[in-house]
Amino acid sequence: MAHAERQILLGNMACVHGAIYAGMKFYAGYPITPSTEVAEGCARELPRIGGRFIQMEDEIASMGAIVGASMAGLKSMTATSGPGYSLMVENIGYAYMVEAPCVIVNVQRGGPSTGLPTKVSQSDTMQARWGPHGDFTAIAVAPSTVADTVTETIRAFNLAERFRTPVTVLLDEAIAHMREMIALPQPGEYEVIDRVKPTCDPADYVPFEPTENCVNPMPAYGEGYRYYVTGLTHDTMGFPTNRPDEIATKLKKLKCKIEDYKDEIFKLRVEKMDDAEIAFVSYGSVSRAALLAVTLARQAGVKVGSIQLHTVWPFPLDQLRDLLQNCSKVIVSELNMGQIVREVERVVQPGAEVHSLQRYDGEILTPMQLLDKLEEVLS
Amino acid sequence: MTTVTKEKEPAPKQKSDVFLHYLRPKKKFPHVWCSGCGIGIVMGALIRAVDKLGLSKDEVVLVSGIGCTSRMPVYLDFNALHTTHGRALPFATGVKFAKPKMKVIVITGDGDALAIGGNHFIHACRRNIDITAILINNYIYGMTGGQGSPTTPSGAFSTTTPYGNVEKHFEPCELAKAAGATFVARTTVYHAPQMEKNIMNAIEHRGFSMIEVITNCHTYYGRLNRLGHAMSMLTWFKEKSVMLGKAKKMTEEELQDKFVIGVLHRADKTEFCDEYQKIVDAHQGGK
């Protein structure tokens, strides 16, 4: 799999290679632009490593199949775009409830509905957080280059296994269909995390018992630990419950296992923020424009920096509060009508201005547009 | 890539202990089903079939969707996956494809399999993946209180067809056969020994097998259509059922309103996981 030499790679293929590096052995999916190359890549690569690829009848079935494969012990993934993600949401909610580790790649395109199949967007940012009904805490990561599509996909698998939860990779069409020169990582270069398995006697196994970090060891089917897995709210044995104390315990567990350990999840790329009075906040393909805009603005003497969110969810509230404490102006740039900007508004100092730079016409935000916005907020 | 742990303790020899052996030790009864419900008879037949086949509890995965039928895995001491409405077959496909040595059995109902799960049903049949689906057909949505389903006959009453059903109904066995299932059987809860044999044959069959079990929902279907209580509905199944051998000698007119029971279709086709394994064997490690 891994090649030391540098190669020109498509973003979607970088995702496939990252997933295989992380141990993916199962892919189920349904074709949808602009994610289809992920499915095609998995169809080619998985048999070569003894893995399994299946094209399902729709995205609902794809999501169901990867949860089934996850319960059977395989690291599993699906990839889609907005319309497919909308269909998957039902069984993503199921994955949250039964705490099934798996990875969902959403190569974002314009919406709502069929929207813009071949055009870039970041308008599923909130859906990645709030897609399924009910209360849960979501994890979503966002790459901005072909190289970090590899590493963010590895990270998504690691987080899924560590926290026993579905993780969304928020790719966007610009990165997914971009080709860049990269070197794939060598074995051992990045840590690969596997789910913890139970070691107790099967008779003593309590599938959802309270643990120190709220994550339970997870057996695979056929390993002797027979337990009940249900999307109904369940007690520590996995059986459906209507008891208020057991319901609250389960929901708190889904939240605390992530919220209490979110320092393990946060990843930011911070550039030129030490003396910054103005900050760009962005994620995904927009962060590329932000970096160039910062370089150009610094040459003109403007004290501006960039914060890139590799972890979009959970939102790094405290980190941003610290980083932005000396900034009087913040420009949040997104390919949507303003989604993550609401989170940023919650963390800035009183009196600081938050400006939202939006683009939602299917085109990328360019460095010049960020500079124009910077000029506007400075004047 | 798969290891199935065999249980140390042997299956019970005493007939009376068989049920206790397969019921979950940590789940207390009563069950959720109405008294007299046919689903219990199906559960009994499934237990006897698994026992007679000598399967270990560890190698069976019981997958269900939503509805009255879907509660069965909570009582049986197998690997269990109680999934979302209509989606049992996709989850089961994931389990089976990931661990082909497991015996994957899906418990579903007429609404679950044929309405919300209709697309998954035909594609599981088409793929001929080695899953056994037991479709418990009671002609109505029981869990939500007696609404019409895709098998509710034309003219029949339900809470959403209060003036009689104007729609046509699905024939699950014909649908399964047409979609590519390679083992298709129909039975009723009156014919418990036959059902047990059908389930055994279906589990042993390499490919997608579907057994339609016609079941009484006296609480809703029986009451709304004046078919009486559980026993009178069982008698109705007895009187309306015709064994396949006998049915072959009857005219279409004579078979009107009758249930033809038995193994209705059997075909020898390649199985999905086997075929994929050939691809893995040919390409693993290579380019």
Image: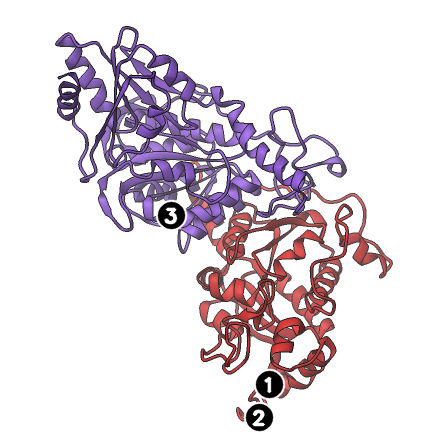
Chain colours: A purple, B red
* Circle 3 crowding by C-alpha within 10 Å: few under 14, some 14–19, many from 20: some
Quadrant in which the C terminus of chain B appears: top left
Report which quarter residue A36 is drawn in. top left
* Circle 1 crowding by C-alpha within 10 Å: few under 14, some 14–19, many from 20: some
Real-space CA distance between mark 1 and mark 3, rounded to the nearest whole angstrom: 43 Å
The answer to whether residue A92 is seen in the rendering is yes
Point out residue B225 in the picture as x, y percentages from the top left corner. Answer: 60, 80
- Residue B254 is labelled as 2
3 or 2: mark nearer the eye: 3
Real-space CA distance between mark 3 and mark 2, rounded to the nearest whole angstrom: 49 Å
- Residue A86 is labelled as 3
Residue at x-position 56% and y-position 49% = B100
Per the image, label 3 sits on a secondary structure element best described as helix
Image mark 3: chain: A
1 or 3: mark nearer the eye: 3
Residue at x-position 55% and y-position 78% = B157
Per the image, label 2 sits on a secondary structure element best described as loop
* Circle 2 crowding by C-alpha within 10 Å: few under 14, some 14–19, many from 20: few
Image mark 1: chain: B
Q: Which residue is mark 1?
A: B258
Tally of marks: 3
> Do tags 1 and 2 sit on the same chain?
yes
The answer to whether residue B216 is seen in the rendering is no
Asked if residue A232 is positioned above or below residue A122 in the image, the reply reads below
Point out residue A348 in the picture as x, y percentages from the top left corner. Answer: 34, 19
